[in-house]
């Protein structure tokens, strides 16, 4: 069996053509035989009636059986291709133009004769041939009335299926040659047309295979150059398959770029995590070594070293917690349990939580517009975590004398919550990346350690869980405003 689609289709077409040609030869031979039989019967339909009307049976004197045989024999002498018989009402042969030893039957079925003599006749009609026990031939018949003779029908067999006759040989040869010639010519033309058509139809499939092989050999990195360009809604299945493959290649290219970008981010994240972990660990290790190597430190110095070590441990704990929380959010492993809650009360609680930090930093912290807020729907624990990150981030980029405010705005179907500060802010290019993992603006603007640029990334993930997104507006040296929305219950 051929390995290519074109070869298989060609083999199937050739086999089908051979089968159909054989069937057509048989059918055409049958049709030719019926055609000649009908033509013979139509041409000789009135022969028997004309013989009867010519009174050829009254030229032999006395009417006896011998005269009947001689009269019928004379008919055979006039037309040797016709066998003549006289039949009674039951179809018994009374006289024939053939010697009795050549007859294999003595009765002929009269049903076809009566059908032939009817007014509405569909030719050809086949009747019994007295020379054969099996097989039928076309005939001509007429009703006769001969005084003193029991004969009722003149029955003429118009031609015999004599395999040795010259006429039958010529007819058979002509029929076979004509049929085979026409069918072979038609089959050759059909095969040629089919080969051309299949080549046209499978050409694009071959091009598609070449493109796919080239794409595979390139390691799925280089887009195939030769791809059929088919407009949507046009072309056949192969063209549409080619278009879908082209779209798949384009998506794979985008996906590969995303993977390369993700790989770059992963390497950057590892570098940032390593740096952010190494810095507090180095400081913690240094202070602990100092405590271990200098037992003569004063109580005040020892307390200072211990306090610094504690802050470094807290920074490490915060960083690890943020890393775990960001990973759980990305993996969808953080339970999301939305419920109705009073956003005003939550904002007041968060403000009280950061009040002491604001007093120590010399930053003014206030909450506006929380008295008449409607109930909202969300995961109160995640929303509190998002607000903590926003405020913690705001404190990192403000200094003494700056202001941090938490405000709300009631919309048609949601409540907008905004955290604004008058700190250092950042430029427009930075605003496109502040929600990326480990992205931080100028480190010199931060005032503490333990912040690895995960705060806004976590807040952004929490906002998406609530069907919202962060809206960030920042102006360098004038401050930053970050807001998101919660649906009203």
Image: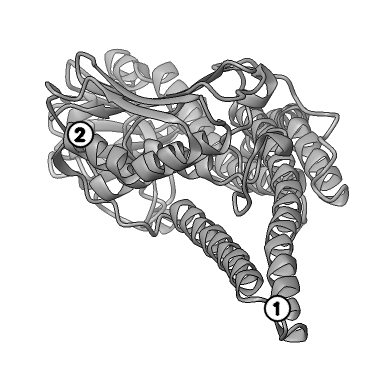
The label on residue 297 is 1
Residue 116 at x, y percent in the picture: 24, 26
Q: Nearer the viewer, residue 274 or 93?
A: 274
What residue is at 48 percent from the left and 33 percent from the top?
Answer: 362
Quarter occupied by the C terminus: top left
Quarter occupied by the N terminus: bottom right
Color style of the picture: one colour
Classify 10 Å Cα crowding around label 2: few (below 14), some (14-19), many (20 and above).
many
Left or right side of 206 for 446: left
What residue is at 13 percent from the left and 44 percent from the top?
Answer: 90
Q: Does the rendering let one see residue 191?
A: no
Instruction: State whether residue 480 is above or below residue 310.
Output: above
Q: Does the rendering let one see residue 365?
A: yes
**Residue for badge 2:** 343
Q: Quadrant of residue 267?
A: bottom right
Q: Quadrant of residue 384?
A: top left
Left or right side of 109 for 80: right
Residue 189 at x, y percent in the picture: 75, 27
What residue is at 38 percent from the left and 36 percent from the top?
Answer: 463
Residue 248 at x, y percent in the picture: 65, 37
What residue is at 49 percent from the left and 32 percent from the top?
Answer: 31
Q: CA distance from mark 2 to mark 1?
A: 51 Å
């Amino acid at each position: 069996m051929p390995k290519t689609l074109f070869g298989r289709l060609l083999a199937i077409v050739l086999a089908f053509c051979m089968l159909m040609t054989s069937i057509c030869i048989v059918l055409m031979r049958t049709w030719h035989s019926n055609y000649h039989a009908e033509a013979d019967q139509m041409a000789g339909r009135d022969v028997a009636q004309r013989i009867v009307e010519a009174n050829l049976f009254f030229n032999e004197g006395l009417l006896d059986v011998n005269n009947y045989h001689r009269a019928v024999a004379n008919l055979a002498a006039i037309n040797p291709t016709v066998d003549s018989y006289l039949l009674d009402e039951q179809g018994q042969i009374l006289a024939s133009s053939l010697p009795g030893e050549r007859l294999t039957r003595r009765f002929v079925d009269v049903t076809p004769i009566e059908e032939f003599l009817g007014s509405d006749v569909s030719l050809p009609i086949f009747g019994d041939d007295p020379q054969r026990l099996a097989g039928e031939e076309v005939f001509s018949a007429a009703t006769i009335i001969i005084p003193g003779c029991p004969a009722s029908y003149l029955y003429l067999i118009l031609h015999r299926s004599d395999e040795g006759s010259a006429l039958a040989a010529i007819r058979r040869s002509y029929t076979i040659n004509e049929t085979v010639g026409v069918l072979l010519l038609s089959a050759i033309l059909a095969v040629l047309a089919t080969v051309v058509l299949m080549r046209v139809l499978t050409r694009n499939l071959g091009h598609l295979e070449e493109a796919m092989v080239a794409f595979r050999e390139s390691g799925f990195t280089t887009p195939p150059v030769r791809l059929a360009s088919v407009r949507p809604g046009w072309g056949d299945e192969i063209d549409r398959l080619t278009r879908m493959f082209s779209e798949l290649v384009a998506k794979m290219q985008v996906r590969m770029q995303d993977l390369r970008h993700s790989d770059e981010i992963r390497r950057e994240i590892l570098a940032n995590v390593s740096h952010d972990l190494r810095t507090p660990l180095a400081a913690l290790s240094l202070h602990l070594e100092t405590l271990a190597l200098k037992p003569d430190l004063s109580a005040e110095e020892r307390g200072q070293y211990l306090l610094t070590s504690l802050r470094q441990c807290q920074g490490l704990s915060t960083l690890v917690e943020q890393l775990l929380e960001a990973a759980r959010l990305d993996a969808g492993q953080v339970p999301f349990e939305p419920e109705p809650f009073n956003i005003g009360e939550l904002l007041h609680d968060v403000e009280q939580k950061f009040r002491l930090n604001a007093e120590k930093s010399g930053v003014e912290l206030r909450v506006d517009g929380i008295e008449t807020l409607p109930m909202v729907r969300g995961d109160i624990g995640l929303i509190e975590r998002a607000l903590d990150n926003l405020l913690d981030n705001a404190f990192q980029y403000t200094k003494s004398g700056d202001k941090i405010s938490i405000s709300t705005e009631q919309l048609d179907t949601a409540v907008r919550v905004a955290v604004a500060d008058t700190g250092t802010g950042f430029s427009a290019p930075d605003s496109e990346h502040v929600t990326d993992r480990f992205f931080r603006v100028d480190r010199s603007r931060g005032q503490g350690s333990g912040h690895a640029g995960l705060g806004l990334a976590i807040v952004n993930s929490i906002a998406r869980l609530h069907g919202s997104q962060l809206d960030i507006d920042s102006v360098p040296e004038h401050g930053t405003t970050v807001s998101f929305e919660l649906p009203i219950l």
